[in-house]
Image (tube, rainbow, N blue to C red):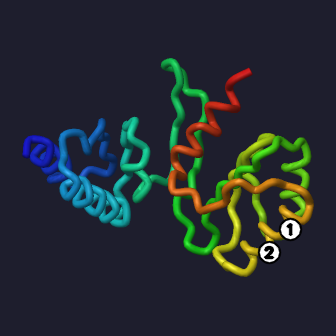
Amino acid sequence: MRQRLAIAQAIVHEPLVLLLDEPAAGLDPQARRDLSTLLVKLKEAGMTLVVSSHILAELEDYCTSMIIMDGGRVVGGGPVKVRDDERPRYVLEIAMPRDDLREFLATQGGVDLIEVDRHHALFTFTRNPGARAKLVRDLVQHGFDVSSFGESTRALEDAYFAGIARTKP
């Protein structure tokens, strides 16, 4: 109840910018959902929200940009499109490493690569089941041992680790 009261005190005067540090800390699941709904409404009403949190899944309903910090330093960030009903994010894993995974996916129509290494790929693609089936079929026909393929449910976490990976040697 203290956390709810603190949030109410912060928004009662309808500030233009709201700074929140771990706003969902100590809240039960229903209160977290209610908080997320409230923050979406505040954002839609034009309020700028600056939220500090290490639990990225809690931010996915209302986050549009992120700053990535590692070891007390800003190491990345920028605009983040978390949810897109037309072009969700997909994660692909292949069993055997292939140096040509990036090149192959780049030639596939509609695949927009986010991160790729020799075993995994994160990319946006259509929600169309026939197009997804064709992509998997083409991967297999070109000798890629597909061990998993599915929609990513952790967009902010993926963006965070992609940002951290770019700063590591």
The residue lying at 73 percent from left, 46 percent from top is: 120
Res 42 → quadrant:
bottom left
Mark 1 lies on residue = 138
Hey, what amino acid is under mark 1?
Asp
Res 142 → quadrant:
bottom right
- Where residue 56 appears, as percent x and y from the top left, is 43, 44
Q: Are dots 2 and 1 in contact, CB under 8 Å? A: yes
Disc 2 to disc 1, C-alpha distance:
6 Å
Classify mark 2: helix, strand or loop: helix
- Point out the residue furthest to the top here: 71
* Picture quarter with the C terminus: top right
> Position of 168 compared to 144: left or right?
left
The residue lying at 71 percent from left, 50 percent from top is: 93
Relative to 127, is 108 above or below? above
**Callout 1 crowding tier (Cα within 10 Å): few <14, some 14–19, many ≥20:** some
Mark 2 lies on residue = 134
- Where residue 35 appears, as percent x and y from the top left, is 24, 55
- Where residue 137 appears, as percent x and y from the top left, is 82, 70
The residue lying at 69 percent from left, 23 percent from top is: 168
Res 88 → quadrant:
bottom right
Count of residue discs: 2
Classify mark 1: helix, strand or loop: helix
- Where residue 44 appears, as percent x and y from the top left, is 37, 66
Hey, what amino acid is under mark 2?
Lys
Q: Which mark is residue 123?
A: none
